[in-house]
Amino acid sequence: MTFQSIEQNTILHEVVARTLKEGITPIRAWREYLQLTQADMAERLGISQSAYAQQEAVEHPRKTTRAKIAKALNIDTNLLDF
């Protein structure tokens, strides 16, 4: 992983490929690409792991939810919109 790619607001091929091939959400693909667990994300967001799992499973989460998750992933919100 190169932080430079993420800073340039580039959606990485690995993330898109997993989303398309495996049918997972962009949020999950980014989390796994960044080698974070659901528990890690829940802690960063100040919520329970089960609450985070529900948010991650939503195909089109609310804009505010995407923004909070993007901040927790340290990526631009636009990288979750594909």
Image: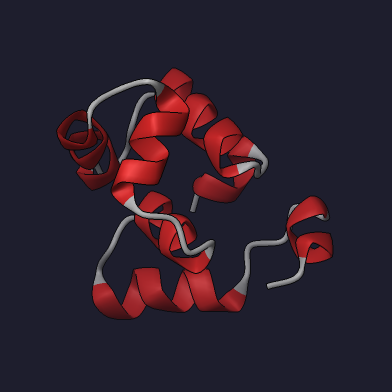
Left or right: 14 as drawn, with respect to 6: left
- Quadrant containing the N terminus in the rendered view: bottom right
Up-down relation of residue 63 to residue 82 (above or below): above
Q: Position of residue 80 (x, y in %)?
A: 51, 47
Residue at (58% x, 77% y) in the render: 13
Name which quarter of the figure residue 72 lies in. top right
Up-down relation of residue 22 to residue 35 (above or below): below
Identify the coloring: secondary structure
Left or right: 53 as drawn, with respect to 29: left
Q: Position of residue 14 (x, y in %)?
A: 53, 78
Give the tally of numbered discs.
0
Q: Position of residue 58 (x, y in %)?
A: 23, 40
Up-down relation of residue 71 to residue 63 (above or below): below
Q: Position of residue 61 (x, y in %)?
A: 33, 32
- Report the front residue among 38 and 62: 38
Left or right: 81 as drawn, with respect to 76: left
Name which quarter of the figure residue 6 lies in. bottom right
Left or right: 12 as drawn, with respect to 53: right
- Report the front residue among 77 and 82: 77
Residue at (42% x, 26% y) in the render: 45
Residue at (39% x, 31% y) in the render: 43
Residue at (54% x, 61% y) in the render: 34
